[in-house]
């Protein structure tokens, strides 16, 4: 039995922020509906309302014409709505069968005691996998499976709940092309059985291969819904970006290109990225564009030595670096503000003073000793230069706003007097004003000769801040763009591998 899903005026607000605004749509039974939109468009908010993770501020959800309210994911489960999240939820040390029925293992009574019915666990898992056309041993431990096989098991687990509506959030972001083919065969089989699917993906090519309909969101508002066979990449991108797709602001005059400071040749770390080659110049802001799963962060971590590449050549100021490590790269003058500042860039319980000094302790100390007095001048300089709003430098970093936390991460590395900086999603989780302040810091430092690699999932930011943009798609550099002559629509199309 399938379900008719209808959303009427669904709205979700967070204070003054409107994450989803008056969403109306009827999702036809037994079809794949692609939810399209840039980051922050409202796709995830919609999915969270449908799976009970958040409740609407206004509007309602109807199943078979009857209004329903989900106070939690359990309510959605019981109504027949199941979500396959982008992040796999499997326990790697357990078997496939154990993961499929984790938390609800069938029981039997023996010798007066309730025990797990292991034959039933394996028999049910085998039958489910066979019915879905999946050739995976139910007794195999998860850690022996590829990412693609693990994703398929995740869907099998979802199907064990016998869903009538399946929500899929970026299910192919970490899959190789052959694994995507397997997944799509499975989704087609589910569609043939009448399962309704809502499918979030940034990969335009997948839209035309698997979806029946594209539902497009922009800034929390539904801008259109079109049958996939009757649309084009250009039409979808136009609905996603509107007028902003036609022109991008330029906030920094193109600098005179300085001497090469970083060069990589044939950098490879399979299966994440392969054969990466480019040169970064003094005073240049080089952007790296790419959709989720393209390998942007992994590439930066590879160059920085946090996850060393399998092969390839790295030269810093002409010096060959055969065994990159964060310590070695820092010695050569490279700094790195990570994507996840709260986990990788800050110690939130430590003081602002301590967080602004962490990366430079080896430079500030004398004879193996260091005092707060040695640290204080540099800390004061970074607070002043970056405009970090603090009550006291002794306050914990966790007490700061997102924008000021990001400035502390930047200041920590600027304290080392770097000659090259990697900025990975520097505006994530900060407000508009703080974002512009961060961008002004990057521009100012580049104007002083700092070489910058700038990664952002917001393509508008790359067009605004960068002097040159490299496009990374599925782990390979596929294009280069000049921001002065590139539209947002063109850049997005290049990231998707389509001529938009």
Image: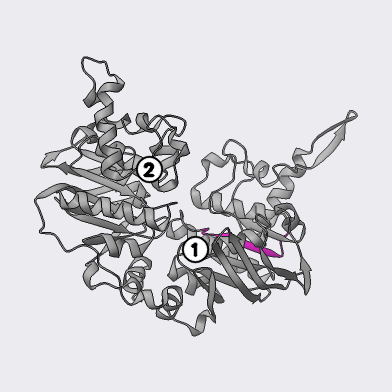
Residue 87 location, x and y as percent?
53, 49
Q: Nearer the viewer, mark 2 or mark 1?
A: 2
> Measured from the top left, where is residue 221 in percent x and y?
54, 72
Crowd rating for badge 2 (residues with CA inside 10 Å; few <14, some 14–19, many 20+):
some
Q: Secondary structure at mark 1?
A: helix
Q: Position of residue 203 (x, y in %)?
A: 44, 66
Tell whether position 164 is magenta.
yes
Residue position for label 1: 181
Q: Residue furthest front?
A: 391
Q: Nearer the viewer, residue 491 or 30?
A: 491
Residue 328 is tagged as: none
Query: Where the N terminus falls, by quadrant?
Result: bottom right
Q: Quadrant of residue 69?
A: bottom right
Residue at which label 2 appears: 389
**Colour theme:** one colour
Which sits in the foreground, 433 or 116?
433
Residue at 56% in and 39% down:
92
Q: Within the image, what quadrant is residue 290 found in?
A: bottom left
Residues in magenta?
A: 162-171
Quarter holding the C terminus is bottom left
Q: Secondary structure at mark 2?
A: loop
Q: Is residue 405 left or right of residue 223?
A: left
Mark 2 vs 1, N-terminal side? 1
* Quadrant of the image occupied by residue 489: bottom left
Can residue 326 be seen by looking at this rendering?
no
Query: Residue 101 magenta-drawn?
Result: no
Distance (Cα) linking label 2 and label 1: 51 Å
Residue 330 located left or right of residue 82:
left
x, y percentage for residue 352?
38, 33
């Amino acid at each position: 039995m399938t379900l008719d899903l209808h959303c009427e005026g669904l709205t979700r607000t967070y204070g003054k922020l409107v994450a989803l605004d008056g969403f109306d749509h009827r999702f036809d039974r037994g079809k794949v509906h692609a939810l399209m939109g840039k980051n922050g468009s409202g796709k995830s908010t919609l999915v969270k309302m449908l799976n009970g993770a958040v409740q609407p501020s206004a509007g309602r959800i109807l199943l078979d014409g009857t209004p329903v309210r989900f106070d939690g994911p359990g309510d959605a489960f019981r109504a027949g709505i199941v979500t396959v999240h982008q992040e796999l939820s499997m326990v790697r040390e357990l078997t496939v069968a154990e993961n499929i029925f984790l938390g609800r293992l069938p029981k039997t009574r023996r010798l007066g005691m309730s025990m797990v019915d292991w034959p039933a666990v394996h028999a049910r898992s085998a039958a489910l996998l066979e019915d879905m056309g999946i050739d995976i041993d139910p007794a195999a431990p998860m850690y022996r499976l590829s990412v693609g096989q693990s994703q398929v098991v995740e869907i099998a687990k979802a199907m064990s709940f016998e869903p009538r509506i399946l929500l899929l959030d970026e299910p192919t972001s970490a899959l190789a092309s052959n694994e995507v083919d397997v997944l799509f065969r499975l989704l087609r089989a589910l569609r043939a059985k009448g399962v309704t699917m809502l499918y979030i993906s940034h990969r335009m090519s997948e839209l035309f291969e698997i979806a029946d309909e594209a539902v497009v969101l922009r800034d929390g508002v539904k801008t259109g819904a079109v049958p996939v066979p009757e649309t084009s990449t250009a039409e979808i991108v136009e609905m996603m970006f509107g007028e902003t797709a036609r022109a991008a602001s330029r906030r920094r005059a193109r600098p005179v290109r300085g001497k090469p400071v970083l060069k990589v040749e044939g950098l490879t770390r399979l299966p994440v990225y392969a054969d990466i080659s480019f040169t970064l110049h003094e005073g240049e802001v080089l952007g790296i564009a790419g959709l989720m799963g393209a390998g942007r962060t992994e590439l930066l971590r590879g160059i920085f030595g946090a996850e060393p590449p399998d092969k390839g050549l790295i030269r810093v100021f002409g010096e060959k670096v055969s065994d990159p490590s964060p310590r070695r790269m820092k010695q050569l003058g490279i700094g790195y503000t990570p994507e996840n500042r709260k986990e990788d860039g800050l110690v939130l319980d430590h003081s602002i003073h301590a967080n602004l000094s962490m990366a430079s302790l080896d430079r500030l100390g004398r004879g193996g000793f260091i005092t707060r007095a040695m640290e204080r001048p540099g800390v004061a300089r970074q607070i002043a230069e970056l405009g970090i709003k603090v009550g006291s430098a002794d306050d914990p970093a966790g007490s700061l706003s997102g924008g000021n936390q990001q400035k502390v991460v930047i200041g920590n590395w600027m304290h080392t007097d770097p000659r090259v900086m990697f900025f990975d999603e520097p505006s994530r989780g900060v407000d508009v004003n703080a974002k512009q302040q961060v961008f002004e810091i990057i521009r100012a430092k580049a104007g002083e000769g700092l070489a910058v690699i700038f990664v952002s999932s917001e393509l508008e930011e790359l067009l605004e801040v960068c002097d040159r943009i490299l496009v990374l798609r599925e782990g390979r550099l596929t294009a280069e763009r000049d921001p002065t002559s590139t539209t947002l629509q063109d850049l997005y199309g290049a990231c998707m591998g389509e001529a938009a």
